[in-house]
Image: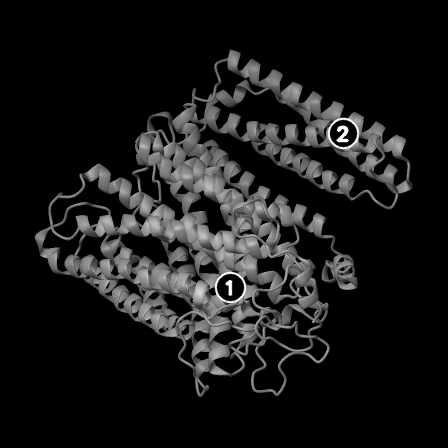
Amino acid sequence: MRSLVSRLRQPAPSWLRYFRWNTDHKVIGVQYLVTSFFFFLVGGALAMVVRTELLQPGVDVLNGTQYNRVMTNHGSLMIFLWVIPVLAGFGNYFVPLMIGARDMAFPRMNALSYWLIPPGGLLMIASFFIGAAESGWTAYVPLSIRAPDGQTLWALSVIVLGTSSILGAINFVTTIITMRAEGMTMWRMPLFVWGILATAIITLTATPVLAAGLILVAFDRLVGTQFFAVAGGGNPVLWQNLFWFYSHPAVYIMILPGMGIISEVFPVFSRKPIFGYRMIALSSLAIAVLGMTVWAHHMFTSGMDPRQRIPFMVSSMVIAVPTGVKIFSWLATIWNGKLRFTTPMLFAMGFISQFLIGGLTGIFLAAIPVDLHVHDTYFVVAHLHFVLFGGSVSAIYAGLYYWYPKITGRMYDERVGQAHFWMNFVGMGLTYLPMFLAGLLGMPRRVADYDPMFLVPNQLASFGGFLLGISVLPFLYNAVISLLHGKPAGANPWRGLTMEWQTSSPPPDHNFDEPPVVSHGPYDYGEGHLVSPEAVPASAAGE
Amino acid sequence: MGYQEAAHEDTFRAGRALGLNHLKLGMWLFLGSEVMFFGGLIAAFLHYKVNNPTPETGLLDVGLVGLNTFVLLASSLTVVSALAAIERGDTAAMNLYLLVTIGLGTAFLGGQGYEFVSLYRDGLTLSSSVFGSSFFTLTGFHGMHVLVGVLWALSTFVRGMGGAYSRNDHLGVEVFGLYWHFVDVVWIVLFTVIYLI
């Protein structure tokens, strides 16, 4: 009632607030989600160009340099402007709600974190006009020193985006530590919040090292330093160390929040408490720590001392253990549950099956003899897309469907959502499974041309890729049509127990009408109470 | 509505229960990321120091830089004194100590500028060798951090003159102090790594 009165007093917020400097974490969250989805479409369009070029052997649509530019910017956009910021968007919108806070700890810095992203993205795209970055998203020296001017813009763009990530991480950790509601102990935090916490710790430790490395590259390009010039005593492998010290943990930056989303979706749609809550939370922290010790497994063929390879192989295999803990916990969660196969649940199931393939092939790649054989082949491309597309993007879609009713106040169209899932799932397998085969047979990655013996897997991959491209259309249709004509969702359409469902959809400016008091864990399904007796659920729009 | 004011007061309840101020925690996290940033640059420097020993290290003037190090260490002492002064409620003493801090920080930057100019005259430049590249990049980034610290000290001083801080409300001085001490500690590491070993 009170929220109704306060709402009637306030003028309806204008949609223009999404285009302005705004310090409300929910507005910033939507800004992140929409902006990064835009870059997902741009990166996806580049992927379509890549798959068109690879539809048949020979250099037909693009020449080699153009291909390198398209491929480089596809990878960079997808990593730095889609997966990382979209997960930060979920974090922005839902971490304060899930811990019962009013906003983030530093609202203005939060707005700054977002507003660094459009210029970062524009810098990267603008590089196409002056000779785009063309040395892969890994920017290995000396290629990235010799590349045209766009490579400098690329480095600046990644530094800007990294700054945004670091500021965001400071905000997340501070918010989670200092702003939890009464009764919201650390061990009552939803696992998505744990995932964001672990991710923020990785961002704080790894991202600054990438910034340092990029500064060395930029200096070599701009002011004539000798860091990577072999003639002057510089060492290109130093870049690989600095780069992978960030970029392997970056994989965990891109997957841990997604695993958090999955950990929200399974209990809700299984109507069961999550299995192994503490182990899932602790395994995220274990991955954050172990993730710092594995980077050189990317460099087995870079001429490192063979004795140094062994510890990195071992640590890379050990990090599969906390990941396995999560997978088995999720399986135990849905075991004997009362399952509801909604779109987010389907994407969560798809996540497990596809991420499992990505994870297991990661263990193959960690084994030194296997890696020496398949290094820089399509086997690696298939592995990383099973992790980042089958894993991260499935989790992102699960989150987008799961929280769509909360963010918009309306239900999406379930049939269209499920059609989207199946197109995505089939397209995913069709695109990336053949790449494992091509890679094992020795097809090198990052080349515009290939031997005719690889024709069949490449055609399968291209048709699968086009299906993935088309599969975005039902999602966009669903998102727009449901926003206009969807059924009102009510506060809690999934009957979830976490805090974000205990306020109206979309939540009011101040998130909760009464200071929330928490007296139980986030996944106590089947235990007879919905929320703590102390907490007063806000009146929901549409109820 | 009562709740909104109450909520505002109670926003950082969990942090207070832990004895953590959110601004200080945020600053500590930022400094943690800075440790990793300098860690990357120091790793690059050490890599080349070990693998490409060069006689150019003989150009470094340890005496001058040792004096400069003393200046920077002294500035940390004055920042501690400034904080102690405002904790007693002595605004005038705080402002004086901040002013001395600004002077010492500026003196350090002057010393570093003099060192850079001399080294350039002796032929050690950003592009003369990989030692020059890593030396100037590492010390240059530290110098930039000192510059930011001096500007921050200046803004703290101006606000202090305007009566912004008191015995019970001096978080701004404390957070500035955290940054300043960090920059000082980084220099101790750099001085050891570059000039002593």
The kind of residue on which mark 2 rests is: Ala
The answer to which quarter of the image holds residue B189 is top right
Q: Position of residue A144 (x, y in %)?
A: 34, 35
Viewer-proximal residue among A190 and A405 = A405
Q: Is residue A525 visible?
A: yes
Q: Position of residue A445 (x, y in %)?
A: 23, 50
Q: Would you place residue A437 above or below residue A139 in this image? A: below
Q: Tell me if B120 is positioned left or right of A80 in this view.
A: right
Q: Residue at x 63, y 46 (%)?
A: A108
Identify residue for label 2.
Answer: B74
- Quadrant where the N terminus of chain A is found in the figure: bottom right
Viewer-proximal residue among A181 and B128 = A181
Q: Tell me if B68 is positioned left or right of A486 in this view.
A: right
The kind of residue on which mark 1 rests is: Thr
Nearer to us of marks 2 and 1 is 1
User: Which element type, helix, strand or loop, lies under badge 1?
Assistant: helix
Q: Tell me if A465 is positioned left or right of A295 in this view.
A: left
Q: Residue at x 22, y 62 (%)?
A: A464
Q: Is residue A445 visible?
A: no
Q: Tell me if A98 is positioned left or right of B83 in this view.
A: left
* Label annotation for residue A485: none
Q: Chain of mark 2?
A: B
**Few, some or many C-alpha atoms within 10 Å of disc 1 (few <14, some 14-19, many ≥20)?**
many
Count the numbered circles shown: 2
Q: CA distance from mark 2 to mark 1?
A: 57 Å
Q: Residue at x 53, y 55 (%)?
A: A29
Residue lying furthest top in this view? B121
The answer to which quarter of the image holds residue A131 is top left
Q: Would you place residue B62 above or below residue A103 in this image? A: above
